[in-house]
Image (cartoon, grey):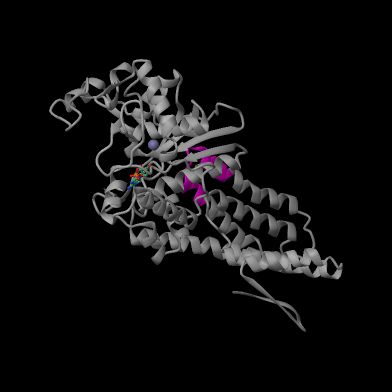
């Protein structure tokens, strides 16, 4: 697979540090409010990259943090008169609901900044001891000039940056040795959450959080670090400086950045007020439509949100779902058909769609083109899979369509239809267990179904079921 690496500005062949394994860190949201659909773009895009890497056989360790200590969280907490953890925990829970709705799989681990403070203090201490950082009146600054590689990700030149800073007197930070230096640790203010440290009671700067959480859960060197393109500078540039000065090793090998989700060609953001939350969208659309809309553009191209494009995505989703439902019906209807003499060739023709799909995704996760391959398969299946098709060929088409959709996180067959089949299979198993006088198993199944909200009724026509 080729990945466009922001560090080199080239598409490069992906070679993991450890064969067969991928370590991936994606900067997560600051949790002070419901996430907006701009925040949802990196979630959907990098969840898809993860799914694709797994499809290729890699074991992916996927870490995505929650920034749960921040000025905006503190402000929201003060406004409500509650502790800032009340705000962050509330919006972490809401964010997880939105992720589930968008079929974004939970990360292998979701670390929270506030639970990693001792490790941040350790890294800051290491940086001070090696001369890359210095404390001044309780605040600790990173000595930017001490890192020769500063600017390598963003392509910024230190002297240009410095002249830009000349007139900028940052209040309270004029004690810095150099305007380019940035904060690793800051003293607490009245009413703010704080932790003890060798320098003062205070809290970490934002950049050190990600360097530390990445190191702790993935090691000093990782394969992929990702986020939205607004994070390239200063966040990711600063993460590189901190991590590489602390470890003496290259931090992340591949840097992936998604372009913005725009509205009227302007970045959707909380501060501009031009946003829709994922929750707003879920009231109007199935969130699968949002996912398909996001994947209909390449992740490095800006994407403009509009009702027309959402409608188009809705129609596309419907087309996929109709094809999947039709294949599902044919699966049952064709079960008794004879095997065809050319089954093998037909199955090979169907499986070739997987190769075409992989070819598109291998090219820097081109989900837009990968989606067109799914539509080619839909068209093929609509024409070629009929009541006359053999069971094996029908199944190959059904499975391939589901497999490709699943890599993109698109649910081709609506859950309920899937569930109905599962429920019926369990009921059958229960009947068989009762016949075999295995009442323990039969009761287990009844309880399992009950937990899923399924009520069984024994009638003279057999077992009937309903949802609570
Ligand atoms: P934040 O909570 O602002 O730190 O953002 C969390 C993630 O969402 C980061 O990876 C940002 O780069 C990303 N992000 C924020 N706004 C947008 C947007 N309009 N389009 C795409 N990504 C965004
Ligand atoms: Zn980060």
Q: Was residue 342 drawn as part of the magenta stretch in this picture?
A: no
* Quarter of the C terminus within the rendering: bottom right
Q: Say whether residue 419 is left or right of residue 47.
A: right
User: In the rendering, at what x and y percent does residue 353 appear?
Assistant: 60, 48
Q: Quadrant of residue 65?
A: top left
Vertical side of 231 occupied by 397: above or below = below
Residue 289 vs residue 85, the one in the foreground: 85
Q: Single out the residue that lies furthest toward the bottom.
A: 460
| Rendering quadrant holding ligand 2 | top left
Vertical side of 422 occupied by 27: above or below = above
Q: Quadrant of residue 383?
A: bottom right
Residue 433 vs residue 327, the one in the foreground: 433
Name the chief secondary structure element in magenta: helix
Q: Single out the residue that lies furthest toward the left.
A: 167
Q: Was residue 357 drawn as part of the magenta stretch in this picture?
A: yes
Can residue 334 be seen here? no
Residue 401 vs residue 373, the one in the foreground: 401
User: In the rendering, at what x and y percent does residue 270 appear?
Assistant: 28, 51
Q: Say whether residue 272 is left or right of residue 277.
A: left
Q: Say whether residue 219 is left or right of residue 334.
A: left
x 87%, y 67%: residue: 436
- Tally of numbered discs: 0
Can residue 310 be seen here? yes
Q: Quadrant of residue 190?
A: top left
Residue 450 vs residue 388, the one in the foreground: 450
User: In the rendering, at what x and y percent does residue 348 appear?
Assistant: 69, 48
Q: Single out the residue that lies furthest toward the right.
A: 436
Vertical side of 359 occupied by 244: above or below = above
x 34%, y 53%: residue: 33
- What is the span of residues highlighted in magenta in the rendered image? 356-372
User: In the rendering, at what x and y percent does residue 30 appear?
Assistant: 36, 45
Vertical side of 115 occupied by 102: above or below = below
């Amino acid at each position: 697979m080729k990945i466009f690496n922001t560090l080199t500005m080239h598409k490069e062949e992906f070679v993991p540090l450890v064969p067969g394994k991928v370590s991936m860190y994606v900067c997560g949201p600051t949790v002070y409010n419901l996430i907006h659909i701009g925040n949802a773009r990196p979630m959907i895009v990098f969840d898809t990259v993860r799914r694709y890497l797994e499809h290729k056989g890699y074991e992916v360790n996927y870490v995505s943090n929650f920034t749960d200590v921040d000025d905006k969280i503190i402000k929201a907490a003060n406004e409500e008169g509650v502790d800032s953890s009340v705000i962050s925990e509330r919006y972490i829970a809401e964010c997880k609901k939105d992720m589930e709705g968008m079929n974004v799989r939970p990360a292998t681990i979701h670390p929270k900044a506030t639970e990693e403070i001792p490790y941040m203090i350790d890294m800051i201490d290491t940086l001070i001891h090696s001369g890359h950082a210095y404390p001044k009146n309780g605040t600790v600054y990173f000595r930017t000039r001490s890192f020769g590689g500063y600017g390598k990700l963003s392509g910024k030149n230190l002297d240009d940056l410095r002249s830009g800073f000349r007139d900028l007197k940052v209040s309270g930070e004029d004690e810095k040795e150099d305007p380019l230096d940035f904060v690793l640790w800051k003293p607490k203010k009245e009413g703010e959450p704080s932790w003890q440290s060798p320098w003062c009671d205070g809290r970490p700067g934002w950049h050190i959080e990600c360097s530390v959480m990445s190191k702790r859960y993935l090691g000093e060197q990782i394969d992929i670090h990702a986020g939205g393109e607004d994070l390239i500078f200063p966040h990711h540039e600063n993460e590189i400086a901190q991590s590489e000065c602390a470890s003496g090793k290259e931090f992340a090998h591949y840097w992936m950045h998604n372009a913005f989700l725009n509205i009227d060609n302007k970045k959707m953001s909380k501060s501009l007020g031009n946003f829709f939350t994922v929750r707003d969208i879920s009231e109007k659309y199935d969130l699968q439509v949002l996912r398909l809309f996001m994947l209909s553009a390449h992740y490095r191209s800006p994407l403009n949100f509009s009702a027309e494009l959402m409608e188009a995505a809705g129609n596309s989703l419907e087309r996929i779902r109709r094809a999947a439902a039709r294949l599902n019906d044919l699966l049952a209807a064709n079960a008794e058909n004879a095997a065809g003499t050319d089954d093998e060739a037909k199955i090979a023709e169907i499986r070739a769609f997987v190769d075409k799909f992989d070819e598109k995704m291998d090219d820097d996760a081109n989900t837009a083109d990968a989606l067109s391959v799914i539509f080619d398969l839909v068209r093929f299946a609509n024409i070629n899979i009929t009541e006359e098709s053999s069971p094996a060929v029908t199944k190959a088409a059904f499975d391939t369509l589901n497999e490709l959709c699943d890599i993109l996180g698109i649910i081709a067959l609506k859950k309920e239809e899937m569930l109905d089949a599962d429920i019926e299979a369990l009921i059958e198993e229960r009947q068989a267990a009762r016949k075999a006088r295995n009442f323990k198993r039969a009761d287990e199944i009844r309880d399992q179904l009950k937990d899923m909200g399924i009520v069984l009724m024994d009638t003279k026509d057999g077992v009937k079921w309903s949802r609570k």
